[in-house]
Structures are given as C-alpha cells and as structure tokens.
Amino acid sequence: MGRKLRPSLDLEQVSGLIGAIYDASIDQRLWSAFLSRFANTFECDQALLLSTTKDGAPQEILLTEGLDLGIMSRWQGSKDHIDLWYQSLARAAPRQAYLYSQLVPSRRLCQSAFYADFLRISDVEYGVGTVVENSSERQTIVAVFSSKRRGDFAREEQQLSTLLALTCRLSSHHRSLEDGGHWVLL
C-alpha cells in the first residue's frame, strides 16, 4: 500500500524540481543534482536515468543516485539479466508514471533472478518510473526506488512523477544535436 506524499512537500518544492529540470536541460552537468533532488523529494535514496536503443543493445545507465554501479554492472553482465521492471515499462505509454508494483506482481518479482541478484542486494523493493523519451530508435526512463521499510509509492507521488516526466520532455529540446538528438549527460 502506498504512503501519502510527505506533508511538507509544497508548491515551492515542486516548482524547484521543475526548475532543476530546466536548469539541467541547459547545463547537462546539473542532471545529477536534479536526480538527487528527485530522490529526496520522494524520501528515497535511489534513482536512475537510463537509456536503451530499440535494436536490443544493452541498457545505457546515464546517471544514478544511490545505486551501487558495481552491483548494476554485474547484474547487467549476467546470463540471467532480465529486468522485469524495464521490460514492462518499455511497453508502457510515454510521459506517464507507472508504479512498478502495478506492472509486475510482487509474487512474480520476488521469485525472479532480477529480485534475488539485484533488487534485494540493492535494498530496492518498489519503484515508480516514467518513459521520458520514446523515439523510433531510443527510449529513456527516469525512475526512483524505495526500500521495503519506506513502502510503495502513493498515488500523489505517481502523479508528481508524471508531471516531472512531462517537464523533462518539454525541456528536451536542449538535447545535443551532435549526438543524434537523444539525451546526453556530461
């Protein structure tokens, strides 16, 4: 069951997040600060921005907050690398936020290698993710994760994530043209 969005979150904080997205779209070095702020807004320690091409190439981790890159690399390199959350989100409509608990039933998730070899080790139980970019060649996803102690995300948090995804998409006109027009983080 989801928690209520923390009571101290106000319009000023939401405006600050939106401003951080616009700032990062102008200065690519600020995406890390945005991702950290994004995770903190949800009272989470972990967030991720990843991209993948639609030709089946491995996911490209653009930026993380609080996730162990060593664990992620080992997981992605394993023969059992099937990311149930990403598979479900990859088929989802862009610019909408999805609770991962709605995409993959908890029972199925907990029985998977994805859970045993990556999520459990990373203290990740729940997530809310958004397809920010979904072109014919590439898909970019931003997500925030929570532990079992924190609990699943509330509807209000899902709605805030959708708003932030729309803002990211609006700001994406600052993407690098030299790199094929997709998200670039320096």
Image (cartoon, rainbow, N blue to C red):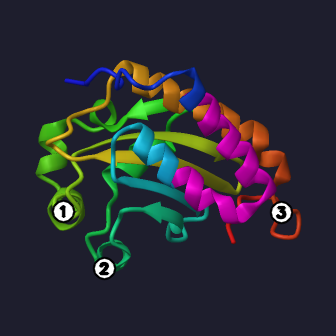
Q: Position of residue 49 (x, y in %)?
A: 53, 56
Q: Is residue 36 left or right of residue 178?
A: left
Occupied quadrant, residue 149: top left
Q: Which residue is mark 2?
A: 74
Inter-mark Cα distance, 1 to 3: 36 Å
- Dot 2: element: helix
- Which residue lies at the image location 46% right of the left edge and 63% below the top edge? 64
Residue 163 located within the stretch drawn in magenta: no
State which tag comes first along the sequence, 2 or 3: 2
Q: Nearer the viewer, mark 2 or mark 3?
A: 3
Occupied quadrant, residue 180: bottom right
Label placed on residue 176: 3
Q: Which residue is mark 1?
A: 113
Label placed on residue 96: none
Q: Nearer the viewer, mark 1 or mark 3?
A: 3
Residue type at mark 2 is Arg
Q: Is residue 185 above or below residue 100?
A: below
- Dot 3: element: loop
